[in-house]
Image: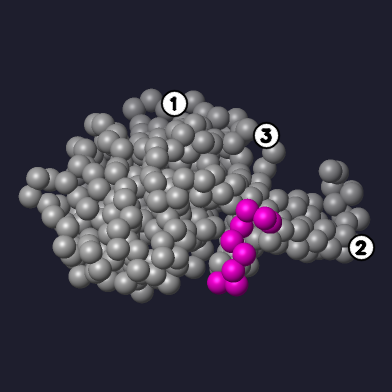
Amino acid sequence: MSDTESERRILDGTAWSDFCDALKRAGDVVLRPGSPMDAFDRAEGFRYLSRLARVALESYIEFADPLFPVLRRPAHETVKIGADNPDNYYQSAAISGAHEYRLSGTRGTVHYLGFGTYAGSYGSQGRRGQTGYLDAREMQIAPDGSFEVILACREPAGKNWLRMEPDTSSLIVRQTFEDRAHERIAELRLERLDGAEKPAPLTPAFVDRGLQAAAAYVHGTAALFADWAEGFARRTNELPKFDPALAAAAHGDPNIVYYHGYFELADDEALLVEFVPPRCEYWNFQLNNHWMESLDYRWHQIALNHFGAKARPDGSVRLVVSLRDPGVPNWLDTAGHRRGTMCLRWVGASEHPDPATRVVKTADVAKLD
């Protein structure tokens, strides 16, 4: 679409009308036959769309200029997307493979730190996936914890390099806590290495295209993860390994092997998830709603990781998912949900054991060996 056409769309209001119409159509994802039909899950679905709209406008209007990138939080306590990890401090920024950038800061003490560059978004057409990845364990870091990373299509000599490709459009940072109460995140600064010092004035084309991209993101994100959830729901209360290619296309971390499933429990039932953890950098298990938003971890114990979970004498772990507390270790609170999705992650694992699952009566959990 030409700049002239965008100016016309701004002047006559078409840009805004199209944006509003597209948001309305996104509601069809919540109402489609495969989605839950009770008022509780639908209310969460419409709240989910409002959250996606909020983050989409930030992504494609407020912080969309790759010439002046800003690290921001795209997922957090009130914006939840695609089984977002409660242990993660997510950051992202708009960048472009046509430029080079410097990411600098101090390492902090957070357990895991990873940087990824990506092409496309959940609502975009064409290629979508990772264009480069750098784990802090691979980086040169000064004794005082300071470091610099160059983001570029060509590798710089003697420096930490995060690869980009010509169609790279975003940077995603994952900072993963082992013990959130006692760890400190990395302090980061992102800057472009070439060009003007101040942004140019706003243009009609920027707003028109930003509104279109934001609307596409809302619908694309909602539809993508609704498709996933409906697929998981065909095998309730199981936790199979997820296709790595699909995870990569959805901007997953290449160091992670994911297991996704769908729980559906009566009020008096509990789901047991049992496994022997492999040697790995980190693992966690979490509960999400149907829309693949992590449940509210501010007020409920909906996730456990390798640090917080209690192992049995033989090294195995049993997690218990239920509406009510059965009075045993490793209870995960469904926070009033009788159905939803769930996710297990192995990060940097030497092997990938499949977890076992079974449903029992909550009253019987304490009697199990």
In the rendered structure, which disc, 3 or 2, sits on the residue that comes first in sequence?
2
> Label 1 sits on what residue type?
Glu
Which label number is shown at residue 155? 1
Horizontal arrangement in the rendering, residue 279 relative to residue 171 (left or right): left
Which of 23 and 272 lies nearest the eye of the viewer? 272
Regarding residue 293, the answer to whether it shows in the image is no
| SS category of the residue bearing label 3 | loop
Asked if the residue at tag 1 contacts the one at tag 2, i.e. Cβ–Cβ closer than 8 Å, the answer is no
Q: Residue at x 51, y 36 (%)?
A: 246
Q: Nearer the viewer, residue 242 or 182?
A: 242
User: What's drawn in magenta, residue-wise?
Assistant: 32-40
> Hey, which quadrant is residue 328 in on the image?
bottom left
Q: Is residue 156 magenta?
A: no
Q: Amino acid at mark 3?
A: Gly
Q: Nearer the viewer, mark 2 or mark 1?
A: 2
Foreground mark, 1 or 3, reads: 3
Taking the spot 36% from the left edge, 32% from the top edge, the residue there is 159
**Element class at badge 2:** helix
Disc number placed over residue 12 in the picture, else none: 2
Residue receiving disc 3: 126
Q: Is residue 18 above or below residue 261?
A: below
